[in-house]
Image: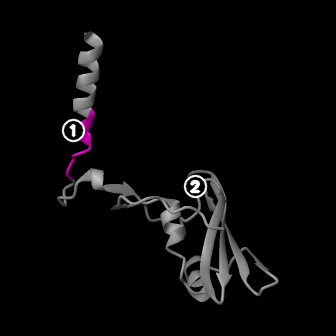
Amino acid sequence: MKKICFITSLIVVLSGCSNYVLPNGEQLGSKRWEEISDRMNKKVGLSEQELISQWGVPNGNYTLSNGSKIISYDVYNSRKDSYCEAKFLIERGKVTKWGHSGNKACGLGSASPSKLIPKTPLPKPTL
């Protein structure tokens, strides 16, 4: 009986959290924190020049036999002692695919903190 009361209490408490309303009137359950994959996915469709103007000169690049390029950036966050390599495939002058290896330093081209965005599935790396 104690187990049933505990489980019921736990369910009531946790269900209250999912309906928390933010100061701007939005429900917390309808949002999630922006992640690295969201930031990287936003680069698809940018021209190579736009990407370079946002991220700076790449640390590496490789031209494929079909003329496409892979450009890479080494991203290091000294506050979190984290590192990764962000890679972008450039086809016909546009970013078409992306990927990253390492830990969660990628995608932090600016020091801006994560923000709440609509609750959508997380984009998956395509490169």
Kindly check if marks 1 and 2 are in contact, taking CB atoms under 8 A apart as contact. Answer: no
Residue at x 21% of width, y 38% of height: 16
> 3 above or below 61?
above
Q: Earlier in the sequence, mark 1 or mark 2?
A: 1
**Residue 110 showing in the rendered view:** no
User: How would you rate the neighbour count of disc 2 (Cα within 10 Å): few for under 14, some for 14-19, many for 20 or more?
Assistant: some
Quarter containing the N terminus = top left
Please report the residue visible at 66 percent of the width from the left and 84 percent of the height from the top.
Answer: 91
Q: Is residue 4 above or below residue 27?
A: above
User: Which residue in the protein does label 2 denote?
Assistant: 104
Q: Quarter of the image holding residue 89?
A: bottom right
- What secondary structure is found at the residue carrying circle 2? loop
Which range of residues does the magenta coloring cover?
Answer: 14-21
Disc on res. 16: 1
Left or right: where does residue 95 sit relative to residue 118?
right
27 relative to 17, above or below: below
Amino acid carrying mark 2 in the image? Lys
CA gap between label 1 and label 2 equals: 31 Å
Residue 73 image position (x, y, % from top left): 67, 70
Is residue 6 visible from the viewing direction of this image? yes
Which corner quadrant of the image does residue 74 belong to? bottom right
Position of the C terminus, as image quadrant, is bottom right
Observer-nearest residue: 73 or 77?
73
Dot 1 alpha-carbon crowd within 10 angstroms: few under 14, some 14 to 19, many 20 or more: few
Q: Nearer the viewer, mark 1 or mark 2?
A: 1
**x then y, percent, for residue 109:** 54, 69
Give the number of marks. 2
Residue most toward the right? 65
Q: Position of residue 32 (x, y in %)?
A: 37, 55
Please, what is the three-letter code of the amino acid marked with disc 1? Gly
